[in-house]
Image (cartoon, grey):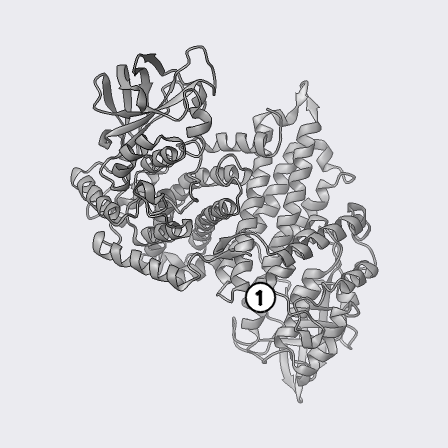
Amino acid sequence: MVDFCPDDTAELKAWRMEVREFLEEAWPRGKVFDYDYDEDPAGWAEYRRFWEKVGQKGWVALTWSKDYYGQGRTAIERWILNEEFNAHAAPSYPVIGLAVASAILRVGTHEQRRRHLKGIAEATVLWGEGYTEPSAGSDLASLTTRADRDGDYWVLNGAKTLGTAAHHCEWMSVLARSDPNSSKHNGISCFLVPLDTPGIQMLPLHNMGGGQQNQTYFENVRIPADCLLGEEGAAWNQVWFGLGGDQLDVPGPVLDGHTMRIARMLGEIIHYCKTTRRGGAPLAEDPVIKIQLGELILGVEAIKLAVFESYSNVANGGIGGRGALSSNLNQAFYKEFWPHLGQVCMEIVGPIAQIQGGKWAQMEGRVEKYFRTSFGNHAGGTAQLKRMVAATRGLGLPR
Amino acid sequence: MAIDLNFNDEQKMIWNTAKEFFQKRCPPELARKYENSEAEFPVELWKEMADLGWLGMSFPAEYDGLDCTFLDVYGIYVEAGRTLAPAPLLEAIAIGGSLIARLGTDAQKQALLPAIAAGDKIVTLAMMEPEGRYGAEGVELAAKPSGGGYVLDGTKLLVACAGSAERLIVAARTGGSGEDGVSLFLVDPKAAGVSLERTRNIGGYPLYAVTFSNVSVPASDALGPVGKAWDALNEVLMKAAVLQSAMVVGAGERVLEIAVGYAKDRVQFGTPIGKHQAVQYLCTDVAIAQHTTRLLTLHAAWKIDSGQPFLREAALAKASASKAAAKMTFAAHEVHAGIGFMIDYDLQLYTLRGKHWEFNLGDARHHLELAATQQLAAA
């Protein structure tokens, strides 16, 4: 039955209130911190403390099995939790950790679950991604980082790039080619790598949005054999799908940090238009600006509804994320929308939007900051890649 | 389940029946036949739809209706849009019938609703005026008090099926400005002083210019409160805008099929053109516009059925549908080049009707502004 209301019972409404009350205590309402675009050390410390508190509540692992530090709660409770985090503008959890946990829960050994899930659940151990390589971006399957077996060890050699916030992380999930004679999707394995292992060197890459990504070099990095996650050579299907390669569809999609960021920008520009006068009249009364705002409202709404759709697909036993036509269409839409939102907000605020801070800046420079971050829309593949996948796999056009 | 975009079993059944019915009864040749035809629409088709119970579905049971919900009828409009069914569902049922059901006195409802449900009579709204302005401000046709009733003077354009309508529902101004002072009157199109002129139009629809010269209307033919009809009228029109969007959703699926089918079959430079990414992106343009509109339209429909405020959501759905109607057909023409430009090829049927849908009940700019107004007021 068509329904867009997540909290349709008294229990779920009470759960929403519980989350809301916790957030009022735990994070200053409206305070913005984007882990992928903020490098302020004090901000990072506050951010990590906040998520440790959430972890202590058991809410990072809300839906995981009780056997592994989870609470065994439902997907809809997780949905509601995220909605409240969005409404409060609480910062989001580093997404890779959740993806790694999801993969470990699916294909990890009992020992790996005992060893890693506690730190992720309590937010005391952060995880970075080691997937993209300098020569393997959209075509990730062309990756060349090698993993060679040497007795009870694997030896990693290669380079990973664009690792968001990896310098804040203690561990990294690394995709490497474990079968030197393989090509493409076969022969790739996933390794759980402690970043303090000798032979790992990390160099910063500073992005336009003010965040730090990283280039990570592996030179004869020896890791114990039990760091292999899932079957040897099968990482493409076991780990990559349902992980960084697509949406996190276990146990169900949720409104995520990116959606939160665009919803917040929309709310702020609307507030700005209501409270700012130009030429003697509020911006909100300018018909051109109203139409521009209408377009932004439409875009944000469509992106939110796409998440509802994914959730519904998964809840009804469909494939939701992975490769579904609707998912690729939605991703193409939002990836193109982010920079569009930044552009239109810049147009609305006008020339003064260039000023980044200080007393002459509009909205404390937040439009300018959002505009810069909006070009970070390529993780997991560009809009064009999503269109290619939608056209060939979804619409059946020839490859 | 609390987040679910699937229709319930009964709704799926109605939808499937509609899909089969329209596929069978409304091939593209039927749409072509009724393009600019003297007969406004095929009466036998209309009667069959009445027999299926579709015309009175949303009416109250006491007036031969079925008390159905908005989502119950949703699929019928999607399928009518997909097949370009030459039937005034939107005009005579979603707008005309709904206005009678919403605002009519018991006598007015008795006189019209059962006959509409049976497919014997239709009523149609006369609202748009020569200035071409949407919303309450666009209603300027004068209704002046005279004797115990009113006298209408002015012209309405784009009035659907006026030639076969039992009654026109005329939006007129009895005073005030903007939303205040908008009134509705039931007028016999054959009454003295009413003249009809069929206007050829882009979609070949039965649209009329209707001129009222000193037309007397008794007070008992007012539909709803005089001077205070806007809120109800607006609500009915915004609901109809969601159904118009549903029609675009259905049509969009067909346009996508046509474009993808051609891209797979058409060989140039020794390869199907659909292998080129430039062509693939055009196809995904169609798919994205259709898909986005589908989500927004479904959401608005759910808001309506769950009794929540829905004007913002309806405006977003129609804004998306209006944009999609233009964007999807444009992209499909780019895929086709010359053949899509030919009258014998079906794509143009969607392109030209799509332009009517784009404007009908408000274009994208109108609805984007409405959505912004709603959100600015709420934030």
- Looking at this view, name the residue that lies furthest to the bottom: B147
- Judged left or right of residue A113, residue B351 is right
Residue at the spot x=65%, y=67% of the render?
B58
Q: Give the quarter of the image for residue B225.
A: bottom right
- Which residue is label 1 attached to? B138
Using the rendered image of the protein, determine whether residue A265 is visible from the camera's viewpoint: yes
A297 vs B104, left or right, is left
Task: Tell me the subunit letter for badge 1.
Answer: B
Q: Residue at x 41, y 11 (%)?
A: A180
Q: Amino acid at mark 1?
A: Gly
Q: Quadrant of residue B175?
A: bottom right
Depth check, front residue: A109 or A262? A109
Viewer-proximal residue among A299 and B196: A299
Q: Would residue B155 be visible to someone looking at this image?
A: no
Q: Give the total number of marks visible in the rendering.
A: 1
> Residue A245's x, y, as percent?
43, 31
Q: Which element carries disc 1, helix, strand or loop?
A: helix
